[in-house]
Amino acid sequence: MVRERPTDFDTRLDLAELLVTDKLTDEASLVLREALALKPDNAEALRMYAGLCYERNSLEEARDRLETAARVGPADPKSDLLLSRVYLGLGDKHRAQAFYQLALNQDPDLEDKSLSASIGLAESAKRVRIKPAGDEHALDYESSPTGISFKDVGGMEDVKEQLRMNIILPLKNPTLFREYGKRIGGGILMYGPPGCGKTYISRALAGEIDAAFYAVGIHEILDAFLGSSEKNMHNLFETARRNAPAVIFLDEIDALGQKRESGSWGRALRGTVDTLLIEMDGLGKPDKPILVIGATNTPWAVDLALRRPGRFDRVIFVPPPDQGAREEILKLHLRGKPIEDVDAAGIASKIDRFSGADIQAMIDRATEEVIKRAMRSGKTEPITTRSLLETAKKMRPSTTEWLATATDYIRYSNQGGFYDQVKSYLDKNQ
């Protein structure tokens, strides 16, 4: 049966529900993408689309959609439960536990013994009561050596140069920068599509500077005892101050910097956000500089309060890997595998806008096909340029949708030139 194409959001959403019921998931995904183009912050559409992403094993996209829905819509325990399953699929049991517990706090009937066992959650810890922060629940933080530096990062020269000017040189030459009235330390917002190396290049940055490095995800700060979140945040900054100069890397900063008045999720995080704002306002001692890098896949969801002067007012866009970076990522993930005459440079030139995660997925899929051939032939079959390119032709870069969304924000919400770096990238890579 051919349905007439709807033209408004509500009709699209109704049609998507019917298509999901009829198990026509590809058609439902298409209609939901059209609906989200009209209302990108509609929580119901985001959650429905995330469910379809989860079914087709697009876990990173499912995660991003669910996280966005949590920021813009009311609390939804079923979505938190799905997010737990998504994080389990991504191999992050810590966050899977946090969202599973959050779901049970809201609706105890959602208990899933199979999921609980998979994420390693003890029976006594399934139900977590939100209670006042206390020292017994506060987290301790230790700096972590990374063992890599910029020489280990292929390509990304523009990003490296911005990091040198904004971080490395001020920390290594504080007197010179102070003479010119330049701030030492402070905050930088690092954003871009998922899987493009924000975390990796930040770890490489730590290898470039003689400073303590603290990489912390938002859910590590929230942990199980949500009432202790403010103290965890304060302890993180206190630890950094004691060991300054220091760099704090806050992953998923958008989860903290959401609109604080939105839904019960926003209310639960309000104290943590306020604590972060206070800590950011207290930075800037010239003798003990602290730099805070906030990383996000969804810069449009970051609270404007976090982007005021003295907070995350410096912005660095981390684009999809350029050709040099793609070539290095290919070599890295092919290391140790049986290969034959693989032209990494040639392949890299044909997979424009592939993220690092896309490249890894391409290699994994090509490897699976080669293994099938090896099982049929009874001998080791090599991975070749041809097998990799054949796999690449069947894939669509995961960055495409992110860049399409960013284009809308460039067109309608680029106040102050916030997205100018994305615009420059798109102008050069049409």
Image: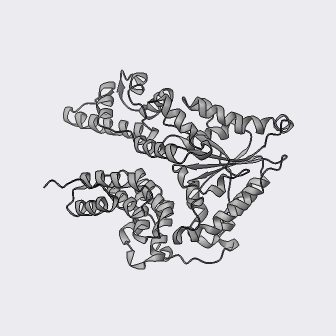
State the residue in front, 123 or 344: 344
User: Is residue 263 in sight in this rendering?
Assistant: yes
Across and down, in percent, residue 124 comes to 49, 77
Residue 166 placement, left or right of 65: right
Question: In this view of the protein, which residue sits in the foreground, 323 or 38?
Answer: 38
Where's the C terminus, which quadrant?
top left
The picture places residue 21, in percent across and down from the top left corner, at: 23, 64
Relative to 97, residue 409 above or below: above
Image quarter of the N terminus: bottom left
- Give residue 72's position: percent from left, percent from top: 49, 63
Residue 126 versus residue 252 in the image, above or below: below
Against 299, residue 230 (above or below) is below
Side of 69 where 245 appears, left or right: right
Residue 133, image quadrant: bottom right
Vertical arrangement, residue 167 with respect to residue 282, above or below: above
> Which residue is located at x 41 percent, y 69 percent?
116
**Front in this rendered view, residue 97 or 425:** 425
Q: Please state if 70 lies on the left or on the right of 110 as rendered.
A: right
